[in-house]
Image (spheres, rainbow, N blue to C red):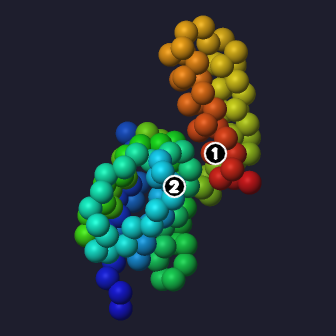
Amino acid sequence: MAEKIQFELVSPAKLLVSSKVDMVVVPGAEGDFGALALHAPMITTVRPGVIDIHDGGKVSSSVFVAGGFAEVNEERITVLAEEAIPVGELTAEMAEARKKAAKEALDDAKSDRDKAHAGRLMLVAEAMAAAVA
């Protein structure tokens, strides 16, 4: 039996996942990466997208994250997410509402900072829409 890696997914609201799994695939800033037991240590940012949790030779669950940070070492992967929602709880209506709010924020943005924030909201909304598609 292959070694498992401890996976913890934490959002500001709560600890969503804390379990030993075969592998976790994370949407990293430089592209998706898989973390297994004995992975080389690293810290990276997480872009908006879906984390796939693999156990028993298949994807056992998927969680949408709005971004955050991931720390990986030989025994554990910890993702600190800005927001995390199980994919099964997402709806197309939620994603569309996010897109609408992001577009309004972009239209109303006056400063570069406001435009950057609105652009980030749009990235999250688009990633959420892709997760429910």
Task: Identify which residue is drawn at 63% across, 32% down.
Answer: 122
Q: Residues within 10 Å of mark 2 (few under 14, many from 20)?
A: few
Quadrant containing the N terminus in the rendered view: bottom left
Task: Identify which residue is drawn at 66% across, 19% down.
Answer: 106
SS state under label 2: strand
Foreground of the two, 129 or 18: 129
Q: Seen from this angle, which residue lies furthest top?
A: 110
Nearest to N terminus: mark 1 or mark 2: 2
Task: Identify which residue is drawn at 25% across, 69% down.
Answer: 74
Is residue 18 positioned above or below 64 on the image?
Answer: below
Q: Nearer the viewer, mark 1 or mark 2?
A: 2
Tell me which amino acid carries mark 1: Met
Q: Which residue is mark 2?
A: 31
Is residue 61 positioned above or below 91 on the image?
Answer: below
Q: Residues within 10 Å of mark 1 (few under 14, many from 20)?
A: many
Q: Position of residue 27 (x, y in %)?
A: 51, 54
Q: Position of residue 18 (x, y in %)?
A: 34, 62
Residue 14 seen in the current view: no
Label 1 with label 2: CB-CB less than 8 Å: no
Q: Which residue is mark 1?
A: 128
Task: Identify which residue is drawn at 41% across, 77% down.
Answer: 22
